Image (tube, rainbow, N blue to C red):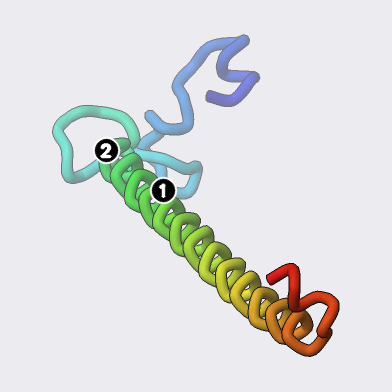
């Protein structure tokens, strides 16, 4: 509702019959006033499915980070073992 209409009174834009002035009656309904374009349940379901997708993406990213970390540690272990084998002094600490 516009500020002037709220203060002075009068009909709201949504209750207006003229298309040019904005709003108008919903011709698919017997009730007066403007119709909602979507229902809240549909929007909520869409947001919920998006959140699930985000959670799945976060889990996939965490799994990928864990896999890379394990690979990095394995490569580091191989390099360390090679360095120990190459040094006679370090071989005793295997």
The residue at the point 61 percent across, 67 percent down is 69
**Element at badge 2?**
helix
**Element at badge 1?**
helix
Residue that mark 2 sits on: 41
Q: Marks 1/2: CA distance?
A: 15 Å
Choose between 12 and 78: the one closer to the eye. 78
- Residue 12: percent from left, percent from top: 46, 25
The residue at the point 26 percent across, 38 percent down is 41
Can you say whether 22 is above or below 32 in the image? below
Does the rendering let one see residue 75? yes
Does the rendering let one see residue 25? no
**Quadrant of the image occupied by residue 14:** top left
- Residue 48: percent from left, percent from top: 35, 44
Is the residue under label 2 in contact with that under label 1 (CB below 8 Å)? no
- Looking at the rendered image, the quarter that the C terminus falls into is bottom right
Choose between 83 and 29: the one closer to the eye. 83
Q: Which mark is residue 51?
A: 1
The residue at the point 17 percent across, 44 percent down is 28
Q: Left or right: 71 with respect to 18?
A: right
């Amino acid at each position: 509702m516009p500020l002037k209409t709220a203060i002075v009174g009068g009909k709201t834009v949504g209750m207006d019959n003229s298309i040019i002035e904005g709003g108008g009656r919903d011709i698919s309904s017997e009730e007066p006033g403007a119709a909602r374009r979507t229902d809240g349940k549909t929007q909520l379901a869409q947001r919920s499915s998006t959140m699930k997708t985000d959670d799945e993406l976060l889990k996939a990213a965490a799994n990928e980070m864990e896999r890379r970390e394990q690979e990095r540690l394995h490569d580091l272990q191989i390099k360390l073992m090679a360095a120990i084998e190459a040094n006679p002094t370090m071989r005793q600490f295997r």
